[in-house]
Amino acid sequence: MNIQQNSVSENNFEQCIKCTICTVYCPVAAVNPNYPGPKQAGPDGERLRLKQPDFFDSALKYCLNCKRCEVACPSNVRIGDIIQMARIKYGPQKNTSLRNYVLANTDLVGSLATPFAPLVNTAVALKPVRFMMDKVMAIDHRRVFPKYSHGTFTSWYKRHAAAAQAAFPKQVSFFHGCYVNYNNPQLGKDLIRIMNALGYGVQLLEKEKCCGVALISNGLYKQAKRQAETNLGSIRKAVTNDGLDVITTSSTCTFTIRDEYPHLLNLQNDDVRDRIELATRYLYRLIQSGEVSWKFRDAQPLRVAYHTPCHMEKMGWAYYSIELLRMIPGVEVTVLDSQCCGIAGTYGFKKENYATSQAIGAPLFRQIEESGVDVVATDCETCKWQIEMSTSKPCLHPLSILASRLELTK
Amino acid sequence: MNNTYDVIIIGGGATGAGIARDCSLRGIKALLLERSDISTGATGRNHGLLHSGARYAVTDRESAEECIRENMILRKIASHCVEETDGLFISLPEDGLEYQSVFVEACRRAGIRADVIDPEEAKRLEPSVNPALVGAVRVPDGAVDPFRLTSSNILDAKAHGAEIRTYTEVKEFIREQNRIVGVRAYDYRAKSEETFYAQVIINAGGIWGHGIAAKAGVTVNMLPAKGALLIFGHRVNNLVLNRCRKPADADILVPGDTISLIGTTSSKIPYEEIDHMIITPEEVDILLREGEKLSPQLAYTRILRAYAGVRPLVASDDDPSGRTVSRGIVLLDHAQRDGLEGFITITGGKLMTYRLMAEWATDLVCKKIGVDERCRTAEIPLPGSAESKEETEKKIRNKPIAQRRSAIARHGDLAARMKGDDYAKNSLVCECEEVSIGEVEYAMENLSVNNLVDLRRRTRVGMGTCQGELCACRAAGLMGRKNSICAKKAKADLVSFLNERWKGMAPIAWGDTLRESEYTAWVYESVCGLSDETEKIATK
C-alpha cells in the first residue's frame, strides 16, 4: 500500500491552506471588528477547539450562516458548517432566551398570531410596543415586523383549493414553509395558479413543520432535529409512495432541507435530496423541456432588479429565477451584485446585530435606489423584509410577478 | 574582572538552563554559553512527553523511579509547561496480554500508579484509540513543552544573576597544567572572540558533549542514535498513547498543545552526521504504519512536519566497545576520572530528568568551590508557574478568548505582562496559533529573541498548519522595526526561516501540506519577490 496516498486528510478543516479568501468575502467581518472572520472562526478555531473545547469563542454567534465563505473557498472547506457545528457542539447549551425562543419558533408564533392578525400587525407597528420589545426582549425597535396574514395558507387551501387539485393530470407536492403559511398566503396561491395553468395539481405534505433554520441559528438543535425528522418523513412519503417531487418557494427552506439537514443535523437525505426542488428552478426546467408551455396576458413594461439571496448563491441557482423572469414579456431584468442584504433570518431582528445588519446591507440598498427599477425580486422572504424596510422599492417573489401576468385559460 | 565567573556552563539545552538556574539560586555566579539558540539540540527534538516512567519500568527501574519523581515535581514547579493528560499503555491483539501483568507489576514497584482499565473504558476516555485493543493501563504520563521549560529556567537564572550568552560557541579551552581555567569563545552576532574564566566549567552539551570533551582533551564516548518523529496538524488524542510491549519503533503518540506527535524510530548514526540529519522515506513509512496501530485516525490526518533528534546515549566507562549504553544520568568528574581539574561533564539522562541532572551537577560544583547551599529547584515554581491560569486570565480579560488562553498556555502568569490594551496589540501575527503583536513584542523584549527561528521557539509563531505562510512576513516586519535590523538582514532572516520550515515539510510533502507549501512559495517568491534573495544566498 502506498502510505502517501493513504495518509491524506479526511478532516475537512485541514484542507484549508489559509488563503483567507473566505474572510475577504465575509459580509460580517467587513463591518464588525468583533467577529474574527470565517477562517479564524472556522478551520483555525476548530483546531484550537480540538485542543481544548473552552477555546470556543462566543463571537461565533456573529456568523450569519450565509455560506458565502463556502462559495468563495477554493479548497472546498465547509467553513460555514464548521462554524455552525462548533456552535452546536461547544456553544452555550441553554441559549433559549425568551427572545430567541420567540424568533425561532416561527410555527408557534405564526399559529398564535394569524387568528388575530389585524390586531397583532397594528400592535407591533406601534412605537410604545416596539420600544417595549426592544427593552424587554432586545428586539431592535427600528426593525419593521413582517405582517401576519389573517388566516393561514393551509386553512385557505383546505377550504378553497384542495378539492380541485386531483383533477389535474400531473401532480406535485408543495412545502409551503412558514412565510407562505402565516405571512404571505398569496405567494402560495400564486404558485398553485401557475402550476394549475401548466396542468399540475398541487398537494401539500401529510405533515409539515418549519424547516428549522431559525431554530438552528438560535441554538434550539434538538427541536430543529425533531422537526426535520417530521419533514423528512413526510417528504419521503410524497416522493416514495406517491412519486411526487417536492417544491418550495423559499430558497432558504430548500437549502436547509437539502444541505443543512445532513451537514448540521446529521440526518441523511440522499434518497430524496434530488427530488426537493426550488419552485423557480422546477418551472424553468419544465418549460425548457418543452412538455408544457404558458401564455401571458399583457406585456406592460416592468423594470425588475433581481437580488440573489445568500443561500441561492450557495446553491448556485439564482440563474433559474433570473431566466424565468426574463421569459415574462415586458419585464426588463437587472441583476444586482450578489451580496448579503444583512438580515439573515432572525439575525437582523436582534438588537445587538441591528447595526451590523444594516451596515452589511448598505451597498445593496444603495444599488437598488440607484437602479431606477420598479420592483425588486428575490426568492427569500427575509431578504424581502430587509429590502422593503431599507429601500423605497417593493420586493416581490419572482413567482408573484409571473402569476400576475399569466393568462389563465383553464 | 567581569569575564570571571564561578562556573561556566557549556550548552543551552534543558540541562544547561537547569544548571544555570540551580547555580544562580544557590548564589553561584554562572555564565551559560550556547553556540546557537536555547533548546536547539535534543531538548527541542523529542516527543515532549512528560514520562511517568512507565516506559522504563520493566527494563530500567532506576530511570523509571527518577521519571516519576521528576514528573511530580514538574507538575508543581512548571505547571505552565505541563499538560496533565495521563496516558494509556494499550495492548493490541498482536501484542497479547502477557506483557501487561509484568508491566503493571514493574510500574507499581517503581512507585508509578498503573490502573488496568477495561478496553471499553479506554475507548470512552480516548475515542481515537485503536478500537481493536484488548487491554489498557492508565498511567500518569503527560505532555511537557521543552521550549517553554528551557526558556523559563533561563528567565529565572537571569533573574538571579546568571549571564546567558546564546550564539556564542566555545572554540577552545584555556588550560593551566592539569586544570581548565577558562574558555575562548566566538560570539557569532558581535563577530568577535572572547575569553571567559571560571573555577569550574561544565560540559552540558548533550550529544555535542562528545566534541566539547575532546577539545578539553578527555574522552566521553557518546553513541548518537537518531530518532525521527512526525507532527500531525491537529490534536488527534488527548491521552498519551503507548504500546504495552517492549519499547520499539513509533509506539508513542503524544498530544502537545495544538498538535499530536508520533515517534520515534531509532538508528545509530556516525557522530559526524548529528548536525545534518535527514528523514528517510522509510522512517516516515515506519512512523505512519506503526502510528496507525495506536490510532487509526492518523491515516487520515494531515501531517505537518517530520523531524529528528539525537539521543545522547553514553557508552559505559568500563566498556570501550560502546555496546553497553545507559539511559541513566552520567555525571563525570574529570578530576577523578582523567586527572583534569575544573571540568565536569553531565550527560545521558532525558528531558524528564533535566532538573535532577542540574541538581547533581550543581551539587558537585558546590563541593568543588566550597558553597554550602542546598538545591531548591524542586520547590520554587518557575517563572510563569507562580499563579493559576484562572488568576492570570482575570488580568487579561480584554484579549479575545482564544488569544488569551493561548498566551497563558505558552507563558503562564507572565502572559499578564503582555500589552493588550488596544486592537493593534491584539492583532494577530500568527493566526494558526493565536500569537498577537503584544506577545511577539513581549518575547522580543524579554526572551532573548535574535531571529525568527528563536521567536518561533518562544511563541509558536510559524508552528501552526500554515508553517509561516501568513505569519513569517508579519513577524519579520515587527522584528525589523524593533531591533532596527536593516531591511537586508530582515529579508535574509525571512528566507532562512522559510527554508527551515520547508526542511521539515519536505519529507512529508504530499496532499494538503504540499498544496499549502506551494501556495506559500507563490506568496513569498512571486508576490513578495523573495526569490531574488534566495538566489543571492544560494550563490554565496
Image (cartoon, coloured by chain):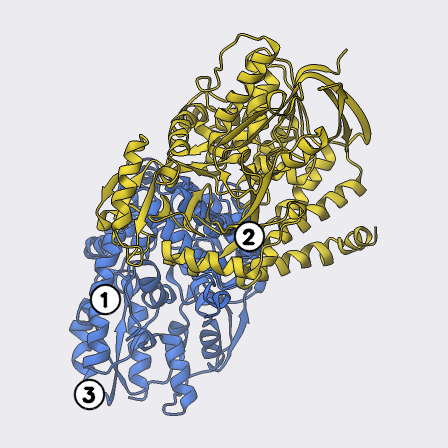
Seen at 42% across and 57% down, the residue is B290
Position of residue B204 measured from the top left corner of the image (x, y, whole percent): 61, 29
Seen at 42% across and 33% down, the residue is B63
Spatial separation of the CA atoms under disc 3 and disc 1: 26 Å
The chain containing the residue under callout 2 comes to B
Position of residue A316 measured from the top left corner of the image (x, y, whole percent): 47, 71
Seen at 62% across and 45% down, the residue is B471
Spatial separation of the CA atoms under disc 3 and disc 2: 71 Å
The chain containing the residue under callout 1 comes to A
Depth check, front residue: B315 or B371: B315
Residue placed under numbered mark 2 in the picture? B306
Label 2: how many Cα within 10 Å (few below 14, some 14–19, many 20+): many
Residue placed under numbered mark 1 in the picture? A231
Seen at 32% across and 54% down, the residue is A216
Spatial separation of the CA atoms under disc 1 and disc 2: 49 Å
Query: Which numbered circle lies on residue A167?
Result: 3
Q: Considering the image in quadrants, where does the N terminus of chain B appear?
A: top right
Position of residue A363 measured from the top left corner of the image (x, y, whole percent): 56, 55
In the image, residue B529 sits, relative to residue B223, either above or below, namely below
Kind of residue indicated by mark 1: Asn
Q: Look at the numbered disc 3 and give the secondary structure of its residue.
A: loop
Residue B157 is drawn in which quadrant? top right
